[in-house]
Image: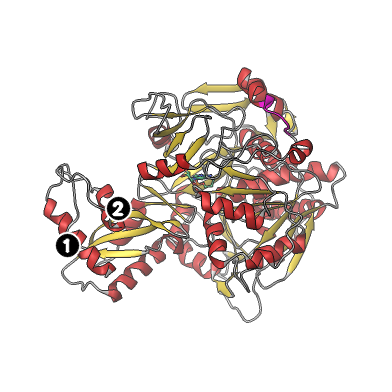
């Protein structure tokens, strides 16, 4: 980590805002920061007033650490805010979603279309017996029906829980069972790199062991000769149900603190956590950060490349841009299908003005070369964003030069599933940018860097901390209030610990260094080391496993697994392949280990804890630090020799 700090502190390029950008921006000077810090609650309340409420709140915040209620007693409906009010306000025929499937099929849905489709699906869910409070799981490709389904849930007050389509049947099953979901919505498949992702087949596998599910709705995305089985009495076609559904559904009056959605994310234990977000505070965050960080204007075409299966797709596809009445691009497939200019062709064809993606994608674009964006007209782009992992200054510069043509500001946005919306970020008309720094906290957010004991760090690295509650914070972990308190609020009293390390420079800018817990950020996706270890030891030939993150050129971090196999097993390329596939089957392709290192023992402390730092050093081929606390220092040497041998 020290090396990273040194490298980042050496970064001294600065990019002040272009006066022409500032002149047209929503936020033109830094007075918003002072306003927010002088009266934080008043600031949030002022912005919350821009949402449409059915009943006003009586108190802005009720804080019984670590449990918060925002906009107490206020009533609103998130779907009304994202759809109905635009239909009422003259935007009815404005494009809400400009969608492209991977094979090249296109659809555009206006806000009016969205209202009709959402109402119909809301009625479908009601007819299936879904009531306010019942959970509905989505396991879908990136098609408009996913947004329609999610908003239909918000309309009737049924919390949605989207499971990324790349997760395995086991992961889907665990998420359905943890929240005892009533209905699951899927598709016969989705397109990815020219192939079909067999979503329905995976759902069938999961549903073998999901007693709470009473119905499975299936959207026909692929059709043709792609056949799936429909189980009598459980499986229903989306189009059959929609054909009979009424095009108006009265929106439910939701309390500000009613659950809007549950989204699972990896933590330090073997089991992902169901992060809960509620209606009022979450919607405020998504609305306000979309407006101010992306400087959204009525004429913008916004494209966030994230899948709705991740929080970025929740906040910056569904709730943020739509509560602003924005026009958005949605794309189903891979960035290199049919060719490596696909994203730039999409930007050209649909006139994208604001583009938001992850560093891992930018590094892949860098590797593919600038000829791809250069072959397309990207002149309408005016603002770029980055999210999900630290962006290395080289990738930042490439993005700025080759995608932004040296003129688009880049907003590097730090936040998490738990924080709901962007927390540390530039405001593009105001903030001087530094490549690799997420810059400063969003107005109203109080961030600090602390030592383990809670002392403020003024120079060098420490733990990132959020000192006070904010409206779009998570409200808990589904079914586990203790874990909520223990994971996020116990390191320092009454303060939030996100699990990231960071440093701050003389200008007060934050430089996020990455996770300091047992979570690995692989290509911008969170994976728990324990999760992968559990998947490995689930294989009959594995006795013990230890997983660490190692640097990777494109993914940022990749997974390396040290594995001790049982006597019956034969270490070698075949078993390596089998074990990698086993992890994919258990969790999903995002968790596939890059390297499996067979080992006869694992370095442990005297108290029996696996020394991951040491394994990381071995996997990275670094010189070993102090190993005197090891139970058997000889193990390390043998591991190191073995690993170097494999590197060959
Ligand atoms: O380590 C941080 C990293 O991603 C983690 C959150 O992951 P997730 O909940 O999946 O949400 C990702 C999308 C918001 C954080 O704890 N992270 C996210 N954004 C950045 C980042 N690290 C550095 N810079 C960022 N801009």
- Looking at the image, is mark 2 or mark 1 earlier in the sequence? 1
Q: Helix or strand or loop: what does disc 1 sit on?
A: loop
Residue identified by numbered label 1: 600
Mark-to-mark CA distance, 2 and 1: 17 Å
Image side of residue 558 versus residue 38, left or right: left
Q: Residue at x 85, y 49 (%)?
A: 92
Residue 559 lies in what quarter of the image? bottom left
Give coordinates of residue 141: x percent, y percent. Answer: 60, 63
Give coordinates of residue 408: x percent, y percent. Answer: 69, 48
Residue identified by numbered label 2: 616
Asked whether residue 340 is in view, the answer is yes
Image side of residue 213 versus residue 104, left or right: left
Give coordinates of residue 104: x percent, y percent. Answer: 70, 71
Give coordinates of residue 423: x percent, y percent. Answer: 56, 36
Boundaries of the magenta span: 27-32
Which of these two is toward me, 388 or 248? 388
Whether the magenta-drawn stretch holds residue 105 is answered as: no
């Amino acid at each position: 980590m020290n090396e990273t700090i040194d490298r980042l502190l050496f970064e001294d390029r600065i990019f002040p805002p272009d006066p022409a950008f500032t002149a047209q921006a929503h936020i033109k000077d830094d007075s918003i920061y002072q306003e927010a810090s002088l009266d934080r609650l008043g600031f949030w309340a002022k912005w919350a007033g821009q949402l449409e409420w059915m009943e006003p709140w009586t108190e802005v915040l009720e804080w019984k650490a670590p449990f918060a209620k925002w906009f107490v007693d206020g009533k609103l409906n998130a779907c009304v805010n994202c759809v109905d009010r635009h239909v009422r306000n003259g935007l009815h025929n404005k494009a809400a979603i400009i969608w492209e499937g991977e094979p090249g099929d296109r659809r555009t849905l206006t806000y009016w279309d969205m209202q009709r489709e959402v109402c119909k699906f809301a009625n479908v869910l009601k007819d299936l017996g879904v009531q306010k409070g019942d959970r509905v799981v989505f396991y879908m490709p990136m098609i408009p029906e996913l947004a329609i389904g999610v908003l239909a849930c918000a309309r009737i007050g049924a919390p949605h829980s989207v499971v990324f389509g790349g997760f395995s049947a086991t992961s889907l099953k665990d998420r359905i069972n943890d929240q005892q979901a009533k209905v699951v919505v899927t598709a016969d498949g989705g397109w990815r790199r020219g192939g079909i992702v067999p979503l329905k087949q995976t759902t069938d596998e999961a549903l073998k062991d999901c007693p709470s599910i009473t119905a499975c709705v299936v959207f026909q995305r692929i059709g043709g000769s792609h056949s799936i089985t429909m189980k009598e009495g459980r499986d229903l076609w989306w189009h059959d149900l929609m054909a009979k559904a009424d095009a108006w559904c009265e929106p439910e009056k939701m309390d500000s603190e009613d659950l809007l959605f549950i989204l699972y994310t990896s933590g330090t234990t073997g089991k992902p956590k169901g992060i809960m977000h509620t209606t009022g505070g979450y919607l405020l965050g998504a609305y306000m950060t979309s407006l101010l960080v992306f400087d959204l204007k009525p004429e913008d075409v916004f494209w966030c490349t994230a899948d709705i299966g991740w929080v970025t797709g929740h906040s910056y596809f569904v709730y943020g841009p739509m509560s602003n009445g924005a026009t958005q691009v949605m794309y189903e497939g891979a960035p290199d299908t049919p060719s490596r200019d696909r994203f730039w062709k999409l930007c050209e064809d649909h006139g994208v003005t604001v583009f938001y993606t992850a560093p891992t994608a930018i590094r892949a674009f860098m590797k593919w070369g600038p000829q791809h964006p250069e072959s397309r007209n990207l002149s309408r782009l005016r603002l770029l964003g980055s999210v999900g992992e630290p962006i290395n200054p080289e990738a930042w510069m490439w993005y700025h030069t080759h995608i932004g043509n040296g003129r688009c500001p880049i907003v590097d946005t730090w936040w998490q599933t738990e924080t709901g919306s962007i927390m540390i970020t530039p405001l593009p008309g105001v903030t001087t940018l530094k490549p690799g720094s997420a810059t400063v906290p969003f107005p109203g957010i109080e961030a600090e860097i602390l030592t383990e004991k809670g002392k403020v760090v003024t120079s060098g690295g420490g733990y990132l901390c959020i000192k006070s509650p904010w409206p779009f914070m998570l409200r808990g972990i589904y079914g586990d209030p203790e874990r909520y308190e223990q994971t996020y609020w116990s390191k320092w009293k009454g303060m939030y610990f996100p699990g990231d390390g960071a440093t701050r420079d003389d200008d007060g800018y934050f430089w996020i260094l990455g996770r300091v817990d047992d979570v690995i950020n692989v290509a911008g996706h969170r994976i728990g080391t324990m999760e992968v270890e559990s998947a490995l030891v689930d294989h009959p030939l594995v006795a013990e496993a230890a997983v660490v993150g190692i640097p990777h050129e494109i993914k940022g971090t990749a997974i390396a697994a040290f594995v001790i196999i049982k006597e019956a097993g034969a270490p070698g390329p075949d078993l390596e392949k089998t074990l990698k596939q086993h992890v994919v089957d258990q969790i999903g392709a995002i968790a596939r280990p890059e390297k499996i290192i067979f080992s006869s023992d694992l370095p442990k402390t005297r108290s029996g804890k696996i020394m991951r730092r040491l394994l990381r050093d071995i996997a990275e081929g670094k010189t070993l630090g102090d190993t005197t606390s090891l139970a058997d220092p000889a193990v390390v040497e043998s591991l190191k020799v073995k690993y170097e041998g494999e590197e060959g």
